[in-house]
Image: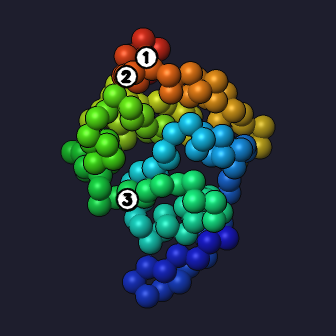
Amino acid sequence: MVEVVLGGRSTLYHVYKRPFVDYFLRKVSGWYTLVIFTASMQEYADPVIDWLDGGRGILARRLFRESCTQLPSGSYSKDLSVVEPDLARVCLLDNSPASYSINQTNGIPIEGWTHDQSDEALLDLLPFLDSLRFTSDVRRVLGIRGFQ
């Protein structure tokens, strides 16, 4: 349960962690600088991010809805140049292709999670993310893998 305060009103939300997310974040934070870039409002996202980080300080930066670009469809896209101007070293793991539509060659898709406790999608990504850190430009590798 996380408490979210919006407009002076407190609401409790049930939030669940995807299987292996703690291990995933611990492992990947040793390879990369982790930035949370969410289309959620800060009032909702901050308590969830705090919970995910667990006081470990592994999530270096947070970007919220106001940093996104709203598309004509109403969905939000994330311009990764606000994270780092040199996009050769930036990738975005997201379950919504619209999220990386501005920087398609930086996107890594992942299926959305719906409480399936046997889900291993984060574990499956670890070997790929491990190898990706040794390339000079992630966009060339992501393009080869057909992630667009």
Q: Earlier in the sequence, mark 1 or mark 3?
A: 3
Task: Give the SS element for disc 3.
Answer: loop
Q: Quadrant of the N terminus?
A: bottom right
* Residue 141: mark in rendering: 1
Residue with the mark numbered 2: 137
Question: What is the C-alpha distance between the residues marked 3 and 2?
Answer: 26 Å
In the drawing, does residue 143 fall left or right of residue 30? left
Vertical order, 142 against 44 (above or below): above
* Residue 59: mark in rendering: none
Residue 2 in which image quadrant: bottom right
Task: Check disc 3: other Cα within 10 Å, few if <14, some if 14-19, many if 20+.
Answer: some
Q: Is residue 75 visible?
A: no
Q: Position of residue 102 (x, y in %)?
A: 27, 35
Which residue is at a point 55% across and 69% down the rendered structure image? Answer: 47
Which amino acid lies under the numbered mark 2 shown in the image of this protein?
Answer: Asp
Which residue is at a point 49% across and 31% down the rendered structure image? Answer: 109
Q: Quadrant of the C terminus?
A: top left
Residue with the mark numbered 3: 64
Which amino acid lies under the numbered mark 3 shown in the image of this protein?
Answer: Phe
Q: Do the CB atoms of the residues marked 3 and 2 lie less than 8 Å apart?
A: no
Extreme residue in the right direction: 118
Q: Do the CB atoms of the residues marked 1 and 3 lie less than 8 Å apart?
A: no
Q: Do the CB atoms of the residues marked 1 and 2 lie less than 8 Å apart?
A: yes
Which one is nearer the viewer's eye here, 41 or 86? 86
Q: Position of residue 101 (x, y in %)?
A: 31, 34
Task: Check disc 1: other Cα within 10 Å, few if <14, some if 14-19, many if 20+.
Answer: some
Q: Name the image colouring.
A: rainbow
Task: Check disc 2: other Cα within 10 Å, few if <14, some if 14-19, many if 20+.
Answer: some
Which residue is at a point 45% across and 20% down the rendered structure image? Answer: 135
Q: Nearer the viewer, mark 1 or mark 2?
A: 2
Residue 147 in which image quadrant: top left
In the drawing, does residue 132 fall left or right of residue 63? right
